[in-house]
Image (spheres, rainbow, N blue to C red):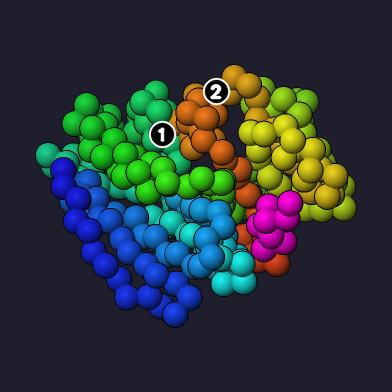
Amino acid sequence: MCFILNLIFPAFLSFQSQATTVHLGSTSVQIRSSDGNPQKFTFLSLHENEQTAVAAARRVIDRHGGRLIELKAQGQRLLSFELDRTRYTFDPNRIFTDIGLEKSLRRYGRYSRAAHEAVVQLRDAILKSIRNDLQLVVAIHNNTSGNLSVESYKRGGELQAEASRIAINPRLDPNDFFLVLNPALFERLQAAGFNVVLQSAEPTDDGSLSVYSQQAGIPYVNVEARYGHLSAQMKMLEALLEK
């Protein structure tokens, strides 16, 4: 495996951008970082098709500063690559623990130790890109109606074991919610009227960044919003900037 660092000219004056390229067999994945000053939080997009989240982060950074890190490869949620004439597929938000990484490769197709080690190179590069963040890593995601929502974490929901507390505002779309690790942040966002999930102290190891962050003590929050809910997701991101 090798890494190639490429400098990319900023799209506009308030941003400075650079990218690291990780080669997974036949596939090249860019980890693209765009910095707006003054820096606030790091916004991280792991699924390339979730562009409402990216648009919301860019607008918030343009107003308030911060950093956006994006994966750029095939334009899809999942990433695929060929290694030794075998095709592998995985979810880039299920690679942050070895258990989760293996589960993800097996779920979407084949598994081998060589493929596992190849994806570890991508994982390490992503973690290196967020390692200097001193305040908060904000994962940004989009979902669809009838899929993941705050109601998934209710008693009887498929993810009830993954939450220690939930707050649901019936006036809001259940697809627009926060997943947090910090009880004080849970209480602040609940008081502000948002849908919020506080992750369980012992969540299932699915390899997600939320699980890894809890294990590693990384300050982390996930901001989920339905595709197309740009203004709602911007409001959620800006709420994190409030003291």
Question: Which is nearer the N-term, disc 2 or disc 1?
Answer: 1
Q: Which residue is mark 2?
A: 204
The answer to the question of whether label 2 and label 1 lie on touching residues, with beta carbons closer than 8 A, is no
Quadrant of the image occupied by residue 70: bottom left
**Pointer 2: residues within 10 angstroms few (<14), some, or many (20+)?**
few
Q: Which residue is mark 1?
A: 96
Question: Which x, y percent locates residue 106?
Answer: 35, 29
Magenta-tinted stretch: 234-243
Q: Secondary structure at mark 1?
A: loop
User: Gap between marks 2 and 1, in whole Å?
Assistant: 13 Å
Question: Which x, y percent locates residue 99?
Answer: 39, 23
Identify the residue at image location x=84%, y=49%: 193
Question: Which x, y percent locates residue 6?
Answer: 23, 64
Identify the residue at image location x=49%, y=67%: 36
Q: Amino acid at mark 2?
A: Thr
Whether residue 180 is visible to the viewer of this picture, yes or no, is: yes
Q: Main secondary structure of the magenta part?
A: helix
User: Would residue 160 be found to the left or right of residue 26 on screen?
Assistant: right
